Amino acid sequence: MPGLNRRGLLAAGAAALLARPALSQRAGLPDRPVRIVVPHGPGGASDTWGRLIVEPLRTLIGQPVLIENRPGASTMLAAETVARSRPDGQTLLMGSVTTLSINPSMFRTMRYDPAKDFAPLSLVASAPMAMAVTNRLPVRSVQEFVEYAKARPDELNFGSPGIGTSPHLTMALFASMTGTRFVHVPYRQSAEAELALMQDEVQVAFSGGFIPAIREGRIRGLAMTSLQRSSLAPDLPTVAEQGLSGFESAVWNGLLAPAGTPPDTVAALSDCIREAARRPETVRAYAQIGAEVVASTPAEFAETIARETTKWGRVIREAGVEAS
């Protein structure tokens, strides 16, 4: 009798497992490996952001998730690759504010349409920037800096990792809202622009990588560019709370599929991405690189893209920014 009971329990357990669908069998999820195409090389911004979500996403989808690096053309090469891929949920884009909301106003011709060629899945994370000045500048707040700059039009240099980048356009937005004028000094990458501020080659800059240097006293932090104080630097007031109401700027990344991807696939992938992003270990990993998990619905992500496209398009036109 004990043997029969044991066999019966095993049979019942097996039946229960068979009756419970595996996550990989959920309607809409890909049944083959998924590749995330990122617009930067290994170690680049979107590459790092993409790799942080690969492992939790793999366990939720039930398939291998691979990173494919396609740098070039101001992130447009990667975007075009995904836009032309089969809409089966197996090829995703790690798209950024540059890819989706800045490029349309920076380039007269593009081989993809951010509004028509993609199905947004989820905004993954967002990183506010810090506004910092060299320690030699006699200012300790945004108000003091604006007064100082207004008295010295075109005398202060600001650094950025290039024309049309988020730090560049953030300073253009700041100048427009405050009536100040600066000399733009573009560098090849963020690290060079950050080092230039520490060495006093430029007097002001915006960057998501300034927090460690601010804490160490190598540069002076004036503000954060988020609307609310950031958990990454809670003691640093925002630009908005220092007199520039509504000022906001952030570098964000999210995952998208090609347009035409079936609705059940979009919904299933979006659910997996949001769950993967919200896991405590994922939240901690993004915090270590200065980003905060957002995890949005497809509709919320689409609204973000549209709103940011309008915003940065206006800044680009008013500042007369053109791609080099």
Image (cartoon, rainbow, N blue to C red):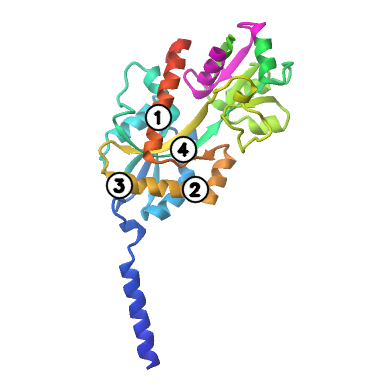
Q: Few, some or many C-alpha atoms within 10 Å of disc 2 (few <14, some 14-19, many ≥20)?
A: some
In three-dimensional space, the C-alpha distance between marks 4 and 1, rounded to whole angstroms, equals: 20 Å
Q: Which residues are magenta?
A: 150-177
Amino acid under label 1? Ile
Q: Earlier in the sequence, mark 2 or mark 1?
A: 2
Q: Residue at left 38%, top 45%?
A: 270
Amino acid under label 3? Thr
Q: Residue at left 67%, top 6%?
A: 151
Confirm or deny contact between disc 4 and disc 2 (CB under 8 A): no
Give the residue number, with chain letter if any, for mark 3: 265
Confirm or deny contact between disc 2 and disc 1 (CB under 8 A): no
In the rendered image, residue 181, in percent from the top left (x then y), is placed at 58, 9
Tell me the tag on residue 47. Answer: 4
Q: Earlier in the sequence, mark 3 or mark 4?
A: 4
**Closer mark to the observer between disc 4 and disc 2:** 2
In the rendered image, residue 272, in percent from the top left (x then y), is placed at 40, 49
The reply to whether residue 62 is in sight is yes
Residue 135, compared with residue 1, is above or below; it is above
Residue 261, compared with residue 139, is above or below; it is below
Q: Secondary structure at mark 1?
A: helix
Work out whether residue 109 or residue 145 is closer to the camera in this orientation and state it.
145
Q: Secondary structure at mark 2?
A: helix
Q: Earlier in the sequence, mark 4 or mark 2?
A: 4
Confirm or deny contact between disc 3 and disc 2 (CB under 8 A): no
Q: Residue at left 65%, top 13%?
A: 146
In three-dimensional space, the C-alpha distance between marks 2 and 1, rounded to whole angstroms, equals: 21 Å
Amino acid under label 2? Arg
Tell me the tag on residue 305. Answer: 1
Task: Report if residue 240 lies within the magenta region.
Answer: no
Work out whether residue 292 or residue 89 is closer to the camera in this orientation and state it.
292
Tell me the tag on residue 278. Answer: 2
**Closer mark to the observer between disc 4 and disc 1:** 1
